[in-house]
Amino acid sequence: MDHAVTGQEALSRIALADDLDTVEALRVEFLGKQGSISGLLKTLGKLDPEARKLEGPRIHALRESVSEALAARKTALETAALDARLAAETIDLSLPAPATARGVVHPISQVMDELAEVFADLGFAVATGPEIEDDWHNFTALNMPESHPARAMHDTFYFPDHNDDGREMLLRTHTSPVQIRTMLKDGAPLRVIAPGRVYRSDSDATHTPMFHQIEGLVIDKGIHLGHLKWTLETFLKAFFERDDIVLRLRPSYFPFTEPSVEVDVGYANEGGRRVVGGSGDAPGHAWMEVLGSGMVNRRVIEAGGLDPDEWQGFAFGTGVDRLAMLKYGMDDLRAFFDGDVRWLSHYGFSALDVPTLSGGVGTPA
Ligand code: PHE
């Protein structure tokens, strides 16, 4: 066996390999399980001790030099490939950025973020509940027993089947069931808002079968109507970003609040759109209803698992879509749910425009 020739030939073939696949093929040919050098190593066992003393170091040295040459060639080829890629892949950092960012935040999402920001500042947490509700949480626990006429007023979407507790299932008609769920889960005291989707079988220019509400609930000791009025006034001023918001509180009726108060804000018509601000009794102004509210009914506090002699509270509910239309000047509610990109790119918000009280709670993109 002439190892010197084998070795020289191997090294020159490795030096000539001009891609990584060839290097790998050579590695298999020489050093693989069936490789020629591996084959030489296997012959050592059959040699007599004298010959083995002579051949052993030579074969090992051969294997060593071949594997070193393979590794060196591999590194050289990889380095060359990387250099070529770096030379080819250039980025011109002086080019202008793409003209417009695609995708905008829907006004409803933006307004819900704005509301969360305004109320977070007043110490309110965000609570949630299911859109598929049972009639106990949606009605009964809110002091609307089965025969209550207010149930009929809600145009409820019912499911054909009852749940495991035998309760009728429905799409929640308002966010008020979250009041019950939050009291049962977290007890008192409480300060939460609950924004979300609600459903009523109703459809025209100002009503869609699905729309958005935000609920507010405060439960504590010694809560009275003054707290409700101050909270709503502070919230509306922060949300509309003006100090001249004037509220009018009117006696009303909701089964789950007693007394119940409907809240109007003063507005004027400017350039064909409603702009809130000023007293509704001022010249050129009128009142517009924006909120339902009141002191939480004792029976609702009881249904929430709390003692109404110990805990009192106020609650309010309003339409998020209506607030968005008022603040940003849209006139057709149905456009909110059409998914028309032209409408969205006009009324949408930049994803980077996160509402903050210090930076302003909303500016269209
Ligand atoms: N749930 C009422 C509605 O949908 C609004 C409301 C909430 C009124 C809380 C009073 C208190 O009209």
Image (cartoon, rainbow, N blue to C red):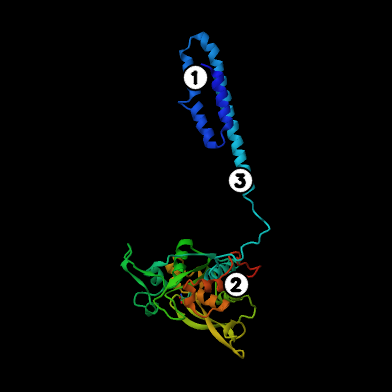
Report which residue position mark 2 lands on.
364
Indicate if the residue with disc 1 has its beta carbon within 8 Å of ligand 1.
Answer: no
Quadrant housing the C terminus? bottom right
Farthest bottom residue in view: 283
Secondary element at tag 3: helix
Which is more toward the observer, 200 or 41? Answer: 41
Check disc 3: other Cα within 10 Å, few if <14, some if 14-19, many if 20+: few
Q: Which residue is mark 1?
A: 41
Residue 322 versus residue 285 in the image, above or below:
above
Give the SS element for disc 2: loop
Disc 1/disc 2 C-alpha distance (Å)? 77 Å
User: Residue 84, percent across and down?
Assistant: 62, 44
How far is the residue under mark 3 from the one under mark 1? Answer: 40 Å
Residue 31 visible to the viewer: no
Three-letter amino acid code at the position of disc 1: Leu
Q: Is residue 124 visible?
A: yes
Count neighbours of disc 2 (C-alpha within 10 A) and say few if under 14, some if 14 to 19, many if 20 or more.
some
User: Does residue 50 appear to the left or right of 157 in the view shown?
Assistant: right
Q: Earlier in the sequence, mark 3 or mark 2?
A: 3
Q: Are marks 3 and 1 in contact (CB under 8 Å)?
A: no
- Where is residue 290? Give x, y as percent: 53, 79
